[in-house]
Image (cartoon, grey):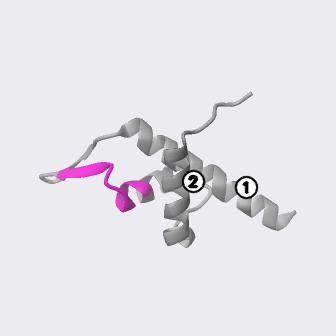
Amino acid sequence: MGRIRQTYIKRVAIELIAKYGDQFTGDFYENREKVKQYTDLVVKVGDREKILYKQMLNRIAGYVTRYKKRKRQSALG
């Protein structure tokens, strides 16, 4: 059995997909950069980025990736 994601993670990911759905792909690392861009989980400090909630960022990006792959798979089959 797999792990169950928190409702907050799912809600944020689905909201991001609803707003910026065409921006996300099936690649985790690209989605991670997009989640950084569209959420407040990252703060600019001078010329650098400071990730406030790294684990949450990764979980949201992972759920977005899984969601997009599942939608693409269901559209094909």
Tag 2: amino acid = Val
Count every numbered label the image shows and give the total: 2
Residue 18 falls in image quadrant? bottom right
User: What percent of the width, then of the height, locates residue 71?
Assistant: 72, 61
> Which residue is at a point 46% across and 51% down the rendered structure image?
32
> Which residue is at a point 49% across and 62% down the rendered structure image?
16
User: What percent of the width, then of the height, locates residue 54?
Assistant: 37, 38
Q: Is residue 43 magenta?
A: yes
Q: Is residue 20 magenta?
A: no
Using the image, determine if residue 11 lies above or below residue 19: above
Mark 1: secondary structure: helix
Q: Which mark is residue 70?
A: 1
> Which residue is at a point 63% across and 35% down the rendered structure image?
4
Instruction: State the residue in front, 13 or 62.
Output: 13
Using the image, determine if residue 53 lies above or below residue 43: above
Magenta-tinted stretch = 35-44
Is 6 situated left or right of 34 in this image? Answer: right
- Check disc 2 and report the residue beneath it: 64
Is 20 situated left or right of 4 in this image? Answer: left
Tag 1: amino acid = Arg
Question: Label 1 to label 2, Cα distance in Å?
Answer: 10 Å
User: What percent of the width, then of the height, locates residue 40?
Assistant: 31, 54
Disc on the earlier residue, 1 or 2: 2
User: What percent of the width, then of the height, locates residue 10?
Assistant: 56, 49
Do residues under tags 1 and 2 come within 8 Å of each other at their CB atoms?
no
Mark 2: secondary structure: helix
